[in-house]
Amino acid sequence: MKITELEPLTTSPVTPRTGISMKALVYHGPGKRAWEDKPRPSIESPDDAIVRVTTGTICGTDLHILKGDLPSVTEGRILGHEGIGVIEQVGAGVSEFHVGDKVIISCITACLKCDFCRRGMYSHCRNGGWILGNTIDGTQAEYVRIPHADGSLHGFPAGGDEEALVMLSDILPTGFECGVLNGQVKPGDTVAVVGAGPVGRVVMLTAQFYSPAAIFLIDLDDKRLAVAKLLGATTVINSSNGQAADQVLKLTEGAGVDVAIEAVGIPATFDICQAIVGRADG
Ligand SMILES: [Zn+2]
Ligand SMILES: [Zn+2]
């Protein structure tokens, strides 16, 4: 199912707003979501914070959920795992944040105490990880409950731009950490990025910290490719003719690229990456 096949957004009948209700985007199974009234969240554990969301964004993951790709997300779940907000309430165990603080919400909830958190592997936190908008209610709402607030929120810098800094919730760290750092981009490398959406652009921008020799940006959309070219792609390739992998192999004289980074999340783009990644010595 394509996202364009979603049912029209429905809203619940307008009900008088009380002190405990809020609006939220709620998942109701594949292709179905509604903007409706839900109870406001409350503190459930001493290390929780309640955040009033002021800026949010939509992730490709939300689109996967709406296509029905993630069975962990069940009917009635409030979507969203990215956002900026202001703390409304904190539990007695929260020490780093206070009511009124403006914060960046991490898409990853981290308890800071389990073995994985202590190894810096927060997305594998035994008491968190990616749970917002997945197994607990998320940020596409007026208010959200953030468990393990001390490890799951970041202070918002004074004078910061909310629309820019919301990229730090997920998009920038995903592109940089999962793509560029895990891909071990090195000076002189050839790097291919499949997907020129926000995550692919972050990969392309942050790969440049490591002075690669070439960055190939592959996408179906010429407008996105034009932006990629402005931001530093050395070669852009429109994959709509099904020839992208062949073109990359031709450009690398059959060797393939040193690093191939997938930034879309569908089988066709994984296939391109597998076809173009070169041999490694490690
Ligand atoms: Zn996301
Ligand atoms: Zn943990």
Image (cartoon, helix red, strand yellow):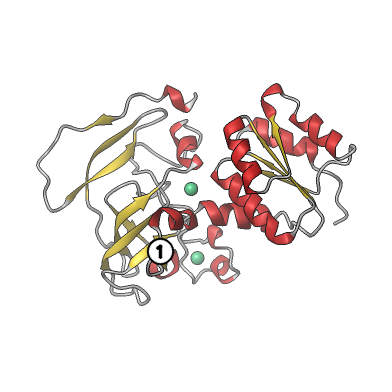
- Apparent side of residue 247 relative to residue 88 in the rendered image (left or right): right
> Residue reaching furthest bottom?
95
Residue at left offset 59%, top offset 51%: 202
Residue 265 in view (yes/no): no
Q: Mark yes or no: residue 102 visible.
A: yes
Residue bearing the label numbered 1: 160
Which secondary structure, mark 1? loop
Q: Could you tell me which residue is drawn at 42 percent across and 41 percent down?
A: 73
| Quadrant of residue 200 within the rendered picture | top right
Identify the residue at horizontal 54%, vertical 45% (top origin): 198
Residue 140 pos. (x, y %): 34, 46
In the rendered image, the quadrant that contains the C terminus is bottom right
- Residue type, numbered disc 1: Gly
At label 1, counting other C-alpha atoms closer than 10 Å, the crowd grade (few under 14, some 14-19, many 20 or more) is few
Which image quadrant is residue 228 in? top right
Q: Viewer-proximal residue, 124 or 216?
A: 216
Q: Is residue 131 left or right of residue 11?
A: right
